[in-house]
Image: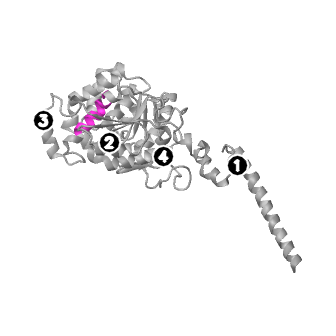
Amino acid sequence: MVSRRIVAAGKFIGILAVLGLFLHFGTLFVSTHYGTSGQTGIFSIWGGSLATNPKYGGGNARGGGENNSYSPDGVKPVKAALVALVRNDDLYGLRKTIRELEDRWNGKHNYPYILLNDKPFTEKFKRGVRDLTRAKVEFGMLEPESWGYPEWIDQNKAREERESARYIKGRSESYRFMCRFQSGFIHKHPLLQGLDYYWRIEPDVHYYCDIDYDPFMLMKNNGYKYGWNIAPTEYEPTVRTLWNATETFMLKHPDLIPKDNLLDWVRDDQGRYTRCHFWSNFEIVDLSFYRSKEYQMFFDHLDRAGGFFYERWGDAPIHSLAVAMFLSKKQVHYFDDIGYYHPAMSHCPAGSKERGKCVCDPREGWANGFSCAKRWRKM
């Protein structure tokens, strides 16, 4: 009986010895292979060094590290920022947007945010935004000439249009101010003067996908001037004379329209306006395009026509008509790999319900099936 106990104890000790050797050499292997600086505690390896190893989502993988150009204070490879026009009561909606952007992309890249308002931002708003990001955040007010009525607008006529309007945002005066600002002034704001590119963001939107590359670098390296994600048709009562005004401009300035343009996207075989436009709440733009002579001339022409106030011309169709007139298809990029939702519409990359780094249902993100998106792909 005693001998059996001795044999059993010996086997147990042998097993412990084997396990000890296994843990010892396993630890050495992990330490050497994963760069954990010779730590000998298996728990300290997983709890410490791997948490700072970029290969496993730690350290520089989130944009940190003094040698990383994407660190919060680093010089970015592109002079770019995420830009929003918001109000103080948009804080919660904007916090949701920034939280998703940080988790999905900007937490790794730390591009700055520029937030603009027609009123001073509250300290509560500033703190609520800065709590979410390590990136630089700048807050600015709109310049007086960029918000409100230009002197040539008949404000009585504008009021009559608002009072009789039966379309979305039709009765809003400030919405028209916003459309005019986004069309002709955002790229002129002093806080954007040092930028080459901007990515427009808005409150209460969703980004469905992890973005594993730098869209600004993609734009720069490929010579893209304009990037978009959703392309619906504009509601006709809001742009009743916009195409006529655009045709008038083209007749006056045929020398500004290159031959390899995209006008067939915005007009059909009979020359009628398709009302196709890029939904500009998501747009990534080389700002040299908006700062160009031809774009400024086009905006000035439309601004004088008064359609921002006598109808409800939006910045989305105006940007889109400018793209169609002045750019070629090789200068425009469709970010169809980025899942995106803005209230009322969304885009979900195919297959995202079952695979990949997007989580959304393509049946609900149906913007890819819009007639204007299909029209684009056929060009």
Dominant secondary-structure state across the stretch colored magenta: helix
> For the residues marked 1 and 3, what is the alpha-carbon distance in whole angstroms?
73 Å
Query: For mark 4, what is the residue?
Result: 104
Name the amino acid, label 3. Gln
Mark 1 is surrounded, within 10 Å at the Cα level, by few (under 14), some (14 to 19) or many (20 or more) other residues, namely some
Q: For the residues marked 3 and 4, what is the alpha-carbon distance in whole angstroms?
A: 44 Å
365 left or right of 160 in image: right
- Mark whose residue sits in front, 1 or 4: 1
What is the secondary structure assignment of the residue under circle 2?
A: helix
Q: Which residues are magenta?
A: 176-189
The answer to if 184 sits in the magenta stretch is yes
User: Where in the figure is residue 6, as x and y percent of width and height?
Assistant: 86, 73
Looking at the rendered image, the disc whose residue lies closer to the viewer, 1 or 3, is: 1
The disc placed on residue 30 is: 1
**In the rendered structure, are the residues bearing label 3 and label 4 in contact, judged by CB atoms less than 8 Å apart?**
no
User: Closer to the N terminus: mark 2 or mark 3?
Assistant: 2
Can you say which quadrant of the picture contains the N terminus?
bottom right
Residue mark closest to the camera, 2 vs 3: 2
Residue 265 is inside the magenta segment? no
Outermost residue toward the left?
156
**Which amino acid type is marked by label 1?**
Val
The disc label shown at residue 126, or none? 2
Mark toward the start of the polypeptide (1 vs 4): 1
**Percent position of residue 378, x then y:** 48, 39
Q: Is residue 258 above or below residue 362?
A: above
Q: Is residue 168 left or right of residue 111?
A: left
> Residue 213 appears at what percent x and percent y?
53, 38
